Image: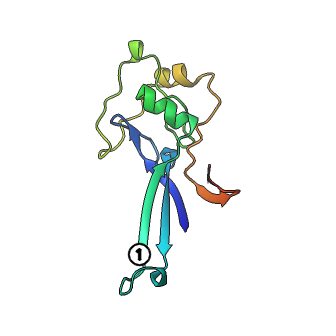
Amino acid sequence: ILYRNGPRKFGIDGDRVAHILDADGLVLRLEFRDPNNGAEGQSGRLHFTSRFVETEGFKEESETKYFTKRGTFGTAPRGLRSIFGEPKRNGLNFDPEPKPSILSRMAANAFQVDIKNTANTQVIAFGGKVLALW
């Protein structure tokens, strides 16, 4: 069995992350099956599965449909939507919208010192569990 991890969820509801490494992690599992254990004439098989790492930030942002925590590389929550408006949602196939105004960024991030754990850097199997690292 081979586990791989990397950034895969590049936005929320059409609003894209500012940097690829701010994206939520996806764990890939590849299982190489032994050709000698199958029926005669069958070659070896590869079984593939994947799953998003459901961190607190991933769950919260999936519910609210917008960024709620700061990313390590520039993705940030926006200020009060009633004052600064909704972000332009171009979709995930387009470049991110230009950065919001400095006032919007200050209002949303002034006292927010925690950074989102994206769990997209490394994955290890330990103690019967698969752990995604940040």
Answer above or below: position of 37 versus 7.
below
At 57% across and 42% down in the image, what residue appears? 72
Residue 67 can be seen, yes or no: no
Where residue 93 appears, x then y in whole percent?
Answer: 29, 47
Where residue 110 appears, x then y in whole percent?
Answer: 60, 22
Which colour assignment does the render follow? Answer: rainbow
Q: Which part of the image, by quadrant, shows the N terminus?
A: bottom right
Answer above or below: position of 99 versus 102.
below
Q: Residue furthest right?
A: 127
Dot 1 lies on which element?
A: strand
Identify which residue, 107 or 52, lies in the foreground: 52
Tell me where residue 82 sits by quadrant: top left
Q: Residue furthest front?
A: 39
Question: Dot 1: few (<14), some (14–19), or many (≥20) neighbours within 10 Å?
Answer: few
- Tell me the kind of residue under disc 1: Arg
At 51% across and 30% down in the image, what residue appears? 60
Identify which residue, 2 or 107, lies in the foreground: 2
Identify which residue, 39 or 80, lies in the foreground: 39
Q: Is residue 116 left or right of residue 96?
A: right
At 44% across and 50% down in the image, what residue appears? 8
Where residue 122 appears, x then y in whole percent?
Answer: 60, 57
Where residue 80 appears, x then y in whole percent?
Answer: 45, 16
Q: Is residue 126 left or right of residue 69?
A: right
Residue 31 can be seen, yes or no: yes
Q: Is residue 10 left or right of residue 6?
A: left
Residue at mark 1: 45
At 50% across and 37% down in the image, what residue appears? 58
Tell me where residue 48 sits by quadrant: bottom left
Tell me where residue 117 sits by quadrant: top right
